[in-house]
Image (cartoon, rainbow, N blue to C red):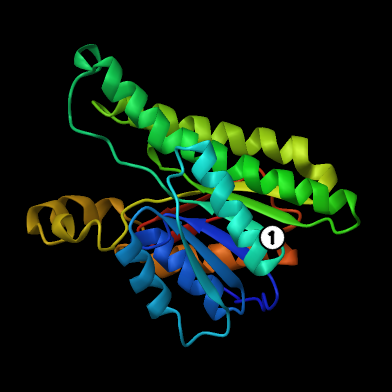
Amino acid sequence: MTMFDLTGRVAVVTGGNGGIGLGIAQALASSGCNVSIWGRNAEKNKAAAASMAAGPGKVDTRICDVTSPASVAEAMKATLDTFGRVDGCFANAGIGGGGRKPFIERSEEEWRTMFATNLDGVFHAFQAAAKHMTARAEAGDPFGRLVATSSLASLFGTARNEHYAATKAAINALCRALAVELARYGVTANAILPGWIKSDMTAGIMDNEKFVANVMPRIPVRRFGEPSDFGGIAVYLMSKASSYHTADCFVIDGGYTAF
């Protein structure tokens, strides 16, 4: 994928200190984009920033709980104080399936926790970014990119992880709705859907030879995707070239990317 020059742009990456989020942050910084990483873990934030220190883009980190509107508002204010603007928001925070419990045995607390972490985090980060982007557009500078990390489960479902699939499907719907609502401000909205991705979070699974043998035949290109695959899409989506590409789901399934 062509890498675009994003010099001068500023992007927020929530959960950008590991796995897919880190791949996105690194690709953006390498393309000249200034990056503000929002994460709960100060040490991981610090390590992520250090991994991008040699790139042309400036990297800033913020302690932020994306499930808290107050924490997000504080992080956005600090980011704007540092960079003066935010051009893109990549909402990557979330949690996985949360166990293989049947739907009829799922507790209220488990259901609410999944929604709060996966869906509320995207809502709060997107709302804070959109308020800034639309205000800037009304002042004569129309540009903004909202991108959420969803899941293939949002398209195909998943047995015993239905509450996880529901949150990811809601994220896809939110992106489509925002694409319509914010188009007049020059703001686009998209979702990226991971398939089988190699990262620090999935290392244990990838070491399981039986799992790999079962999954590999289902992957068209016979390889697991890498966090850098997401980075290429992130750079594209931050560029002007992607202005016509909104409300789409960018699917990565074992390295196979379908636009």
Which image quarter: residue 23? Answer: bottom left
Residue 221 seen by the camera: no
Q: Which residue is mark 1?
A: 87
Q: Quadrant of the N terminus?
A: bottom right
Between 72 and 180, the one lying in front of the other is: 72
Report crowding for label 1: few under 14, some 14 to 19, many 20 or more residues within 10 A (C-alpha): many
Q: Nearer the viewer, residue 183 or 1?
A: 183
Which kind of residue does numbered mark 1 sit on? Asp
Picture residue at 85% right of the left edge, 43% below the top: 184
Q: Depth check: 216 or 48 in front? A: 48
The location of residue 156, given as percent across then percent down, is 39, 33
Query: What residue is drawn where x is 50% and y is 44%?
Result: 71
Q: Using residue 136 as the reference point, say whether residue 31 is left or right of it.
A: left
Q: Say what secondary structure mark 1 lies in.
A: loop
User: Is 66 displayed left or right of 157 in the figure?
Assistant: right
Q: Is residue 81 above or below residue 145?
A: below
State the residue lying farthest toward the top: 104
In the depicted view, which residue is nearer to us: 178 or 232? Answer: 178
71 in relation to 88, above or below: above
Hey, which quadrant is residue 108 in on the image?
top left
Q: Residue at x 48, y 34 (%)?
A: 120
Expressed as whole percent of the image width and height from the top left, the position of residue 82 reads 63, 68
Residue at image location 69% in from the left, 60% down from the top: 87
Quadrant where the C terminus sits is bottom right
Q: Residue 122 at x, y = what percent?
A: 52, 41
Pinpoint residue 75: horizontal percent, then vertical percent. Answer: 54, 53
Drawn side of residue 9 relative to residue 147, left or right: right
Furthest-bottom residue in this view: 54
Residue 12, visible in the rendered structure:
yes
Total marks drawn? 1
